[in-house]
Amino acid sequence: MLIQEEVIELLNSVKDPFLHRSLEELNAIQSVTIKEEKKHVSVKIGISKMNTGEQMQLQQEIVGILKRNGANTVGLRFEQLPEETIKKYQSEAEKAKEETLISGASNTQFVAVASGKGGVGKSTVTVNLAVSLMRLGKKVGIIDADIYGFSVPDMMGIEERPVVRGEKIIPVERFGVKVVSMGFFVEDNSPIIWRGPMLGKMLNSFFTEVEWGELDYLLLDLPPGTGDIAMDVHELLPSCKEVIVTTPHPTAAFVAARAGQMALKTDHEILGVVENMAYFESKKTGEKEYVFGKGGGKKLADVLKTKVLGQLSLQQPYEEEDEFAPSVYQEDHPNGKEYHKIAAKIIAKLEG
């Protein structure tokens, strides 16, 4: 029959499913009681999260180990690990979780671009921020996570589709930026009628089944608001940073505050606010007209205790006959220059 020391030795290497640390490291085996006549072993274990599917799997693992080594019956009791133990190992566990999502992701910065409502230019900001980061020498990818309103491929003038190599999807590359979008997998702009769990599975596939290679930055174009996909991103990528997009209109800024507050509540750092369509500048007079009002970006930044990263004017990219990309601003375009400054500020904040 097993003795107490043998039980502890057998269970020491078992890992907490969320902290990815052994029970020995976590000092999680709290008591062991043995009834020799019945070959019964009772164990009390500390774990980081109670009442989860992972707890059930851990229970089965521990019972299996002890029964294979001589126990007839096993009694298991779980309780929460001390808060200081959980905090000590949590950040490392979150980093490990992200690395399993994308192989080689230890040096990848995840940046989600969010807004409170549609139509404020969130996807335009995502695309141009990605291109500007690339122009500054960074390796960049985009996940078009706006699964209902995917638009990144059209904005970038992408016409080809990803190819599959082995079991991995190879992202499409345009302007030096790697892109994956729901738009690649939908025929003829068909409407998406999936529900939350299916959407979450698709998003997860964009991480795990795509051959991203080495990336410095992976940008996520989130759907507007605070729905299922935004929640999934917060769950999948605990270290993800956020950029909040708004127009100068007070209502847009008010609604965008919800997306920002969600980021704060889930401990996602907000890098700053981008105010899109801030003004229209007349080519004839040079005067600025504040078509959508004034001050929304600053007001939103104050509410979220962050800064305005940049203000973009209301104008189209230059027309180019040999390059079709309806939403990508050229490097020498006024908005191209503004995006360059925004990208430089983000790099300074994350790498400085």
Image (spheres, helix red, strand yellow):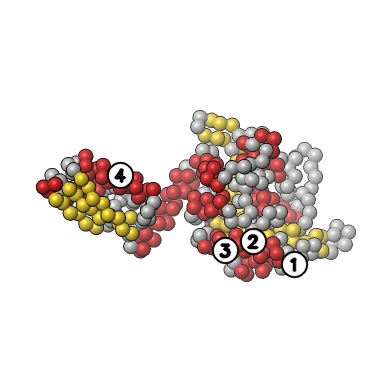
- Reading the image, the residue beneath label 1 is 294
User: Which secondary structure, mark 1?
Assistant: loop
- Reading the image, the residue beneath label 2 is 256
Mark 2 or mark 3, which has the lower sequence index?
2
Q: Closer to the observer: label 1 or label 3?
A: 3
Q: Quadrant of residue 61?
A: top left
User: Which secondary structure, mark 4?
Assistant: helix
User: Which secondary structure, mark 3?
Assistant: helix
User: Which secondary structure, mark 2?
Assistant: helix
Q: Badge 1: how crowded within 10 Å, few (<14), some, or many (20+)? A: some
Instruction: Looking at this view, name the residue that lies furthest to the left.
Output: 37
Q: Tell me the CA gap for discs 2 and 3.
A: 9 Å
Mark 1 or mark 4, which has the lower sequence index?
4
Q: Tell me the CA gap for discs 2 and 4.
A: 45 Å
How far across and how far down the image is residue 107, in percent? 49, 49
Camera-side residue of 33 and 176: 33
Q: Closer to the observer: label 2 or label 1?
A: 2
Res. 277 in view:
yes
Res. 158 in view:
no
Q: In which quarter of the image is residue 270?
A: bottom right
Check residue 261 in the rendering and tell me which mark sits there, or answer none: 3
Mark 3 or mark 4, which has the lower sequence index?
4
Mark 2 or mark 4, which has the lower sequence index?
4
Query: Residue at left 40%, top 57%?
Result: 90
* Amino acid bearing label 2: Ala
Q: Badge 2: how crowded within 10 Å, few (<14), some, or many (20+)? A: many
Q: Tell me the CA gap for discs 1 and 4.
A: 60 Å
Check residue 60 in the rendering and tell me which mark sits there, or answer none: 4
Query: Residue at left 75%, top 44%?
Result: 326
Query: Residue at left 36%, top 55%?
Result: 50
